[in-house]
Amino acid sequence: MNETIQNLKAHVSVRAFEDTPLSDELKDALIQAAQSGSTSNFVQAFSILEITDPTLRKQLAEITNSAAYVEKTGTFYVFVADLYRHAMLLKNNGQSIEGASNTEALLVAVVDATIAAQNMAVAAESLDLGICYIGGIRNDIPKVAELLALPDHTLPLFGMTIGVPVHKNETKPRMPRSNQVAENHYPKEVFTDFSQYDAQLTTYYQERSSNAQQADFSTKMAEFFSVTRRQEIAEFLKAQGFELDK
Amino acid sequence: MNETIQNLKAHVSVRAFEDTPLSDELKDALIQAAQSGSTSNFVQAFSILEITDPTLRKQLAEITNSAAYVEKTGTFYVFVADLYRHAMLLKNNGQSIEGASNTEALLVAVVDATIAAQNMAVAAESLDLGICYIGGIRNDIPKVAELLALPDHTLPLFGMTIGVPVHKNETKPRMPRSNQVAENHYPKEVFTDFSQYDAQLTTYYQERSSNAQQADFSTKMAEFFSVTRRQEIAEFLKAQGFELDK
């Protein structure tokens, strides 16, 4: 097993950083990594905004409920699933923008943005930095779009906070392979049998060094999905020009 | 710059592999890497199917128009954005499945599946293997779902072919940073000014060692988006129980 794979396996989300800004050289490496990933048909349907303005960072920290690690960190990026460039190019050519607006187009942009982000995460962790995806920017997605001056055909997908960790938790045990990986056909019963995983996570949650608790996968998920989250995203995407009925 | 970042920057999609199957040890490392990535609120909303059955591989190769590198390769995985487990768990609890069905839930699952896939890609490339994302499984998404016996609340997102490369192309120049990365606010005019990139890609397409052609970014995108692709995905997602109007 090489160092890259060891680092991938050692991933934990970090939520406590030193207050030191990352150097330009370091951020340069992170951006290059992000831009080098695979992209569907070379469309490169994403953008990256680095949030350097302290007021803006504070506003985003409030929206995301993550002040401790969005404001105090090395840097904070927002990843945007982005078909604005393509839509503009098509409009300027007098072409239909339908192909840059439908559900397929949105999937392409979300996948492209995520590949870029995960490359950045891997690059950061290879340099002993810590990262955390900040899905909380979707807590108030119209406000985030307004704050960042996002045009139509864009979706602010998540933030990523990156810095020098002051604390790292233990890695969290992922699902047993039998729950998530199979050959050829989807095994409905095996994938939904959480008896082994629930037992494993019960022990993990009891014994972990911080925030120990009585919980397992099934109870965590039942609790998490008891609230329907972020119900304004469909409307937001429609207002942005996406047509998810197509 | 460390080796991990050098590898990320050296990424190219590979479409010609040796016919040698990957060892179990190797696939084990790839799966572990995929399972170790970040996941929104620990939902782990993805599955991985390894396609080992030759008939099934052939059927998928036809759907994806990628016979040369889906059939002849080290292995072929399908990544599934997957909320079936969560929906079943909620149903068994007598809870509403709305939170596992709306647009937010789909985004979470697509992001989770992509983070896992990109971790696998990075792991593979760190071992000198080549990879190619196969978005072509979305060419006939209901058929793919049928072939893989996918239940509701799942979306087959892309395949990934992984093997020992017999040929690697040069890296393709990504957008200039000025087209894709900015501070704080989205710069609409700068991001859509492709004059520099078009000139750069014109040279690249003229001079590359295989399939040289007269093209640039603007012409490639105009051509690509002249056809509206994969128009049955919205209907498929609805049939799978996703509610993209919510």
Image (cartoon, coloured by chain):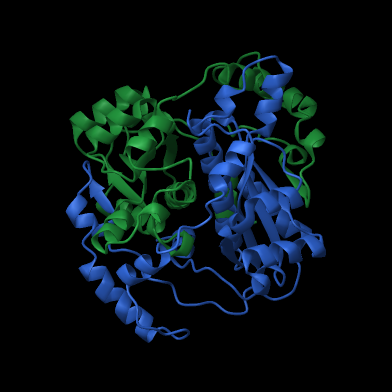
Chain colours: A green, B blue
Residue found 74% across the figure and 28% down from its top: A197
Question: Nearest the camera: B192 or B228?
Answer: B228
Rendered position, A8 above or below B77: above
Q: Quadrant of the N terminus of chain A?
A: bottom right
Residues A2 and B176: in front is B176
Nearer the observer, B199 or A199: B199
Residue A244: give x, y in percent of width and height: 46, 41
Q: Is residue B164 left or right of residue A77?
A: right
Number of numbered tags placed on the structure image: 0
Which corner quadrant of the image does residue B71 belong to?
bottom right
Instruction: Give the percent coordinates (x, y) of residue B191.
Output: 24, 55
Left or right: residue A144 versus residue B117 is left
In the rendered image, residue B102, in percent from the top left (x then y), is placed at: 52, 29
What residue do we see at 28% from left, 75% from top?
B200
Would you say residue B22 is visible in this rendering? no
Residue B61, can we see it?
yes
- Residue A136 in the image, given as x and y percentages of width and height: 40, 28
Q: Which residue lies at the image location 57% right of the left edge and 23% below the top edge?
A: B98
Quadrant in which residue A207 is drawn: top right
The residue positioned 36% from the left and 26% from the top of the image is A64
Residue B222, above or below A112: below
Image height check: is B2 above or below A241? below
- Front residue of B136/A189: it is B136
